[in-house]
Amino acid sequence: MLSSFVGAWIALALFLVSAFLLVIGLAGNMALSKATQTEQVKKRSILVIDLSGTIDERESAAEPDIMLLVQGNLQAPQTLDVIVQAIREAAVNDNIVAISLKCGALSAGPATLDAIRHELLEFRKTTDGKKKILAYAGSFSQGCYFVASVADKIYMNPAGEMGLQGLSSSSMYYKGLLDKLGVQFQVVKVGTYKSAVEPYILDNMSEPARAQMDTLLGSMWGYIRSEIASARKGVTAASVDSLVSVDYISFAKADKAVKAGLVDSLMYERQYNSRLAEISGREVDKLNFVSPRTLVSQSPWADAYGSKKQIAVLYASGEIADGNKNQINYEDLVPVIVKLADDDNVKGLVLRVNSPGGSVYGSTQIGEALDYFQSKGKPLAVSMGDYAASGGYWISANADKIFADPLTITGSIGIFGLLPNFKGTLDKLGVNVATVSTNPGAAFPNGFKPLDDTQLAVMQKYVDRGYDDFTSRVAKGRRMKKADVLRIAEGRVWSASTARRIGLVDSLAYLRNAIDWTASKAGLGDSYDVAAYPEVSPSIWNMIQLSSTTMGELKQAVDARDEEFLRTYLLRRILGRKPVQARMPEFRIQM
């Protein structure tokens, strides 16, 4: 009787969950259908690029993310590949007369923003100025303005602000939290600058870590201010620095941005729409706006899976985390690489890397699969996005040619091991662990007591061996002497321009350049097709993200912003990683 009762309740629960998912799916489909019916690419249309929210590398089959639920941020992110292709399509589509950049709160990496900006510059060259780019913002964030600076005309709300402030980077240090919990990390590493371990053992940034970040940010800011200056008449790199450091323009009145030459005019959004109406030859109430996704649907890109002249673009985005479907999982990626190697229709491969690194084992497996691809006599190029560091560089090092965005962060050639010791936690709880072993290493490491000197020496040799494998791979792939690699390794992160100078990168260029080079190397010239991998099958979670009503309800249902929840989440995130990592330091560059 009890089993029947429990079974009935389980069946009811499953039914309710299924019904809930079905309703969400229907809501998502209705939202998608409504969006498709509303937007049409008519004559004299304007492509609107909404520079707000998150911009990912590429659409993926979304998985539930508890932190997004907690933050209430379930908006389906825009993707770089769609935005870039939409700009390219807008240049040749006779129905598109202009591009409007609508700037808001934007979360995207510097190289992602630079890729969009570069494509807008190509748009101006292709159209020879016949199709205009206009930009508008209530207030400009620095990242948005960097992209918008290429526009023919830039407008801002009279009550708005110009958020130029230079670059900064912040890192979280967890030692205080770990001390409270009684968790101690023992570290083995190679490299003076391998500072990814510091947040777990220090309260603040070490001097070597601060020095490398200072150099990195200085190089990137030099590029950004120079690019802004080159796009705006009368503006120089020195004047940008002065506006930021002397005038504190981000706190100045809006007319200061006009006087400085950063903005053409101040106006309200209705006035901006009137300008768009003049350009399009339509009345304001009959303006026809289309989104990048709608425009790209007119001419799908990177879906030539049946072509016999195929250049494959393989996306490796996220942390290299074994078994994690939301990151770069070698168990998923390696079979795809092997299949591409064995497919006679695939003539070359571009590996698009946007990764800070991660698992040494996973990096090794992906690297070996890429070696197998090259053994088939097919060219392999790497195109680097925001990051291609540590494990991200490991999988890039043997490519025939490496292309990096001018704002890519790369290098971080080093390995570290983090081994947690929970004895302090157990002592707080009044728990003692008794262990019986047949051999000294049978329970090593067990996490219940600190490592002794012998065990630490064993772990150091283990990490040293991995570092030797890493630097040897770089030396072979980059055709450098091992001694030269060791001088630029040490776990140090480099800007793309410096990486090119020291031999870690071949060219400062973009994904399209990498594709063109690979096709040429494969003997295809201009006659080739592109297919993107892994192939994406959207999940139920993608449908959830399409429905704003559902997003609001889910946000209310998981309103769990309490300290205990965040503490637990952070601890799980820290302890969930593999003990030995090839990963760059965790930091976020504020644009």
Image: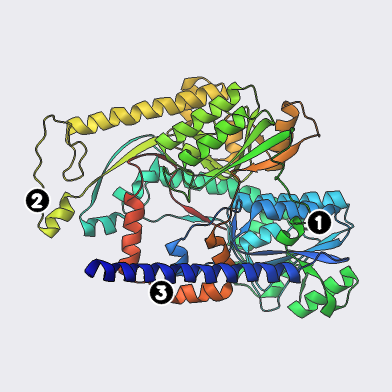
Left or right side of 419 for 166: right
Q: Where is residue 101 in the image (x, y as percent from the top left)?
A: 73, 64
Q: In this orientation, which residue lies closer to the viewer: 89 or 203?
A: 89
Q: How would you rate the neighbour count of disc 2 (Cα within 10 Å): few for under 14, some for 14-19, many for 20 or more?
A: few
**What's the residue at 46%, 67% (across, down)?**
18
Circle 3: residue type? Asp
Q: How would you rate the neighbour count of disc 1 (Cα within 10 Å): few for under 14, some for 14-19, many for 20 or more?
A: many
In the rendered image, which quarter is residue 10 located in? Answer: bottom left
Left or right side of 556 for 240: right
Label 3, label 1: how far apart the Cα atoms are: 41 Å
Helix or strand or loop: what does disc 2 sit on?
loop
Helix or strand or loop: what does disc 3 sit on?
loop
Q: Where is residue 62 in the image (x, y as percent from the top left)?
A: 53, 57
Residue that mark 2 sits on:
432
Residue that mark 1 sits on:
90
Residue that mark 3 sits on:
559
Q: Where is residue 426 in the image (x, y as percent from the top left)?
A: 15, 54
